[in-house]
Amino acid sequence: MLWIPAGLALALVVLPVAGLLVRTDYARLPALLTSSASLNALRLSLVTAGASTVACVLLGVPLAVVLARATGRGVRVLRAVVLLPLVLPPVVGGLALLFLFGSNGFLGRLLAEVADVRITFTTAAVVLAQTFVAMPFLVVSLEGALRGAGDRYEQVAATLGARPWTVFRRVTLPLLLPALGSGAVLSFARALGEFGATITFAGSLEGVTRTLPLEVYNQAEADVDSAVALALLLIVVAVVVIAVARPKAVEGRT
Amino acid sequence: MTLRAELELSRGEFALSTTFDVPAGTVLALLGPNGSGKSTVLGCLAGLLRPDRGAVTLGGRALTRTPRVDVPPHRRGVGLLAQDPLLFPHLSVLDNVAFAPRSRGTSRSRSRELARHWLSEVDAAEFAERRPAQLSGGQAQRVALARALAGEPELLLLDEPLAALDVDAAPAIRGLLRRVLRAAGARSARATVLVTHDPLDALALADHVVVLADGGIVERGVTRDVLAAPRTAFTARIAGLNLVTGTAEGGALRTASGGVVSGVPAPDVVDGGPAVAVFSPGSVAVYPGDAAPAGSPRNSATGVVAALEPHGPVVRLRTEDGDDWADGVAADLTPAAVAELALEPGTPVWLSVKAAAVAIHPVGDEIG
């Protein structure tokens, strides 16, 4: 009996993608993908998503370790806060960033006056927005791995005479590598697909803040074939990500 | 290094309060049921837990002295062997064992040289290039022991080191621990604390034993004295064992008076060496004194009932004036059996123990 709704669910996922594949104008595909607007968007997407993934790793690893190892009462609250961007509509996140870093925002005004730096509507704003939405993916997968492993290996390493930094470098980090890899790829994918927070906080300026998803949205009004071609590119990237990262769900494990 | 520990700690309902010494070169067993506080004591010694009040000194150096001194685990000079080997899965066996020397700043090649030495000490040299995942439980525990020893700890902590091993692997590791703990060079310097719930481990490995219950010490003393003649009912219940001393001979034990006790010898029993036959009071069968037990080849001997004491759901009988090994032996019976056999102090009885229920262990000079 479950086969009917299960089949429907599968169709809901597969059919739109298949429709896109059918609709694609394969003759114009190379020309559409190599137009300067497309190439600009692709380059910008790869650079910003790469940069935000690096930011996610640098900031997310310590955060995950702290969340997994801390025992205080406030940790549960902290964890809920960290997960906020995961459930928050990206547009709301973008709006929040805008009111923090915008010309009237508290940090935005501070940065403008002290360092003469304006963040909104720059490539930095794109990276910031992407990091905001993508970091929870990294933190959640790392924290799960850390909790699963417990701190018994670290305790043994300490009794063997390893200083805390040596323990982190030679035991904690190597044990985390698989989870770090899949967490980083998931973050990269989320950053690459970011739309709502980016368009709200960074706008849509070609070559500066117009990433692939924004370009798809832009072209959908002007040239549908071009939009479809770019969408195809994003689908290819998504498939590659799933193949590389192999999140636990794909392996059939929990 | 002599270890002195005075620990007080409470966590909710549980309160721990103990004081003990471990002279350099000796092994102390902390014996007790689950929840008695054994592992908490070990955590405090390793520096992984902080007592509410107390002091731990090792060879005169203060490791813990509340409220000010609390040396972190990595500067204590302790080695820890837990129930699970906990070998680092991303390092080869060799690099696992080389971890402690590396952490102390020894060069990579010298550390590996040391690691090879310790691996051969535990008969695990051939596993050097393997990954921990490719080892059996017993092999992994050998490697974990080598890793703990490679740090050349002044204090070695063994936390139920045999509990997670299957019945085939445990005797071999027990024999290995015996050999390593009693190796001449190490003996002089190192203090060892063994946590266990198995009186056999204490008997085979420890010079002294401390019996813990609900966070407090109920009995302490030389291992054999405590286990063979427990002074408290609690110790008798968890650790009361029948011990018969003698000489190992062809897989059996020859007593001083010339009798033979058949049993299952441990792998490291040496013919002609001092040994002890161990069996639980529950494995001793009691028959009326006028009817010698017949049938399977058992250890049988006569004795006289000296005392009968209620012992939880059973009655513990102790003999006197026994023939050969049957002197001072404890046997557990149901109250119904006591009534049926009309037992009372002075009644002559036959005692019998199946050879399969008797373990024969070598004993060192200290505890023999």
Image (cartoon, rainbow, N blue to C red):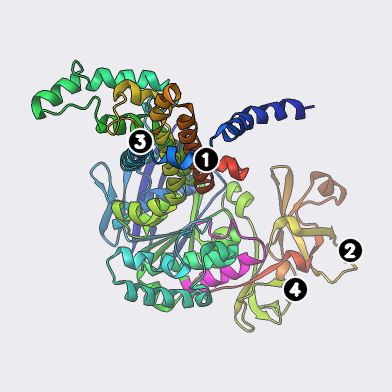
> Which residue does the numbered mark 3 point to in the structure image?
A41
Residues at discs 3 and 2 both on one chain: no
Q: What is the three-letter code of the residue carrying label 4?
A: Ser
> Which residue does the numbered mark 4 point to in the structure image?
B262
Q: What is the three-letter code of the residue carrying label 1?
A: Ala
Q: Chain of mark 4?
A: B
Eye-nearest disc, 3 or 2: 3
Q: Secondary structure at mark 4?
A: strand
Q: What is the three-letter code of the residue carrying label 2?
A: Asp
Residue at the limit of the structure toward the left, as seen here: A114
The image quadrant that residue B300 belongs to is bottom right
Q: Chain of mark 2?
A: B
Cα separation between marks 4 and 1: 90 Å
Tell me where residue B263 appears, x and y as whole percent.
73, 71
A229 to B253, vertically: above or below: above
Q: Is residue A80 visible?
A: no
Residue, x 38% and y 19% (percent of image)?
A: A91
User: Bounds of the magenta span?
Assistant: B158-180
How packed mark 3 is, by other alpha carbons closer than 10 Å (few <14, some 14-19, many 20 or more), is many
Residue at the limit of the structure toward the top, as seen here: A104
Sequence-earlier tag: 2 or 4 = 4
Sequence-earlier tag: 3 or 1 = 1
Give yes or no for contact between labels 3 and 2 (Cβ–Cβ under 8 Å): no
Cα separation between marks 3 and 2: 102 Å
Left or right? Give the position of A170 relative to A250. left
> Which residue does the numbered mark 1 point to in the structure image?
A27
B362 to A85, vertically: above or below: below
> Which residue does the numbered mark 2 point to in the structure image?
B290
Q: Chain of mark 3?
A: A
Tell me where residue B364 appears, x and y as whole percent.
52, 74
Residue, x 49% and y 43% (percent of image)?
A: A241
Cα separation between marks 2 and 1: 107 Å
